[in-house]
Amino acid sequence: MLKGLWQCPKCGEKFVTPNMWHSCGQHSLEALFARSEPHVLHLYRRFEELVKACGPVTVIPQKTRVVFQVRVRFAGAVPRKSHLQCSFGFSRRRDHPRFSKIEQYAPRWYGHYCRIEKEEDLDEEFGSWVREAYEVGQQKHLAQESGG
């Protein structure tokens, strides 16, 4: 069984461990996308729709990115001038030509990054990554390992 989330008394953000470092900042999507071309915000909105179709999610705009969280943060986007840099957390490494970078952060935590330039990039394959990352955000793999 997974423990409840700790909530920062200052900003209200929730984390899996108490007193986890964070900036306590309050940011807006408008400020985050202010330097991007208008179609980049459109791409982000489509990405957000795909994430929200998976189930309940918390959207957290930060200074340089926006992240999505269920129990943990499992996906995110960094707006650039003419494209969106999307990221996913997977419990395994997934090699694919569309991933520009893959980093292992922990034994069961791999960050995968891809560039989104046009709506066609948000295809069914991209949707399957969103769904897999959402399950990681729920920490289903940990619940299964502990028999929960």
Image (cartoon, rainbow, N blue to C red):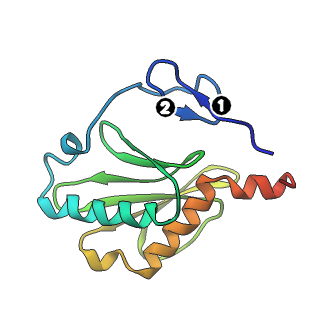
Which of the pair 67/97 is nearer the observer?
Answer: 67
Q: Is residue 127 above or below residue 13?
A: below
Residue depicted at 54% across the width and 68% down the height = 131
Q: Determine the residue located farthest toward the right in the rendered image.
A: 147
Secondary element at image label 1: loop
* Outermost top residue: 10
Label 2 or label 1, whichever lies nearer to me, is 2
Q: Is residue 135 above or below residue 74?
A: below
**Crowd band around label 2 with a 10 angstrom C-alpha radius: few (<14), some (14–19), many (20+):** some
Q: Are there few (<14), some (14-19), or many (20+) residues within 10 Å of tag 1? A: few
Q: Amino acid at mark 2?
A: Glu
Q: Quadrant of residue 140?
A: bottom right
**95 left or right, relative to 116:** right
Q: Residue 85's x, y, as percent? A: 33, 59
Residue at (85, 51) in percent of width and height:
146
Observer-nearest of 135 and 85? 135
Task: Kindly identify the amino acid type of the residue bearing the numbered disc 1.
Answer: Thr
Is 28 displayed left or right of 133 in the figure? left
Per the image, the residue denoted by label 1 is: 17
The N terminus, quarter of image: top right
Expressed as whole percent of the image width and height from the top left, the position of residue 92 reads 65, 63
Residue drawn at x 35%, y 74% is: 122
Kindly identify which residue carries mark 2. Answer: 13
* Disc assigned to residue 127: none
In the rendering, at what x and y percent does residue 47 appear? Answer: 36, 64
Q: CA distance from mark 2 to mark 1?
A: 12 Å
Mark 2 element type: loop
What percent of the width, then of the height, locates residue 11?
Answer: 44, 24
Q: 125 left or right of 123?
A: right
Point 64% across, 36% down: residue: 16
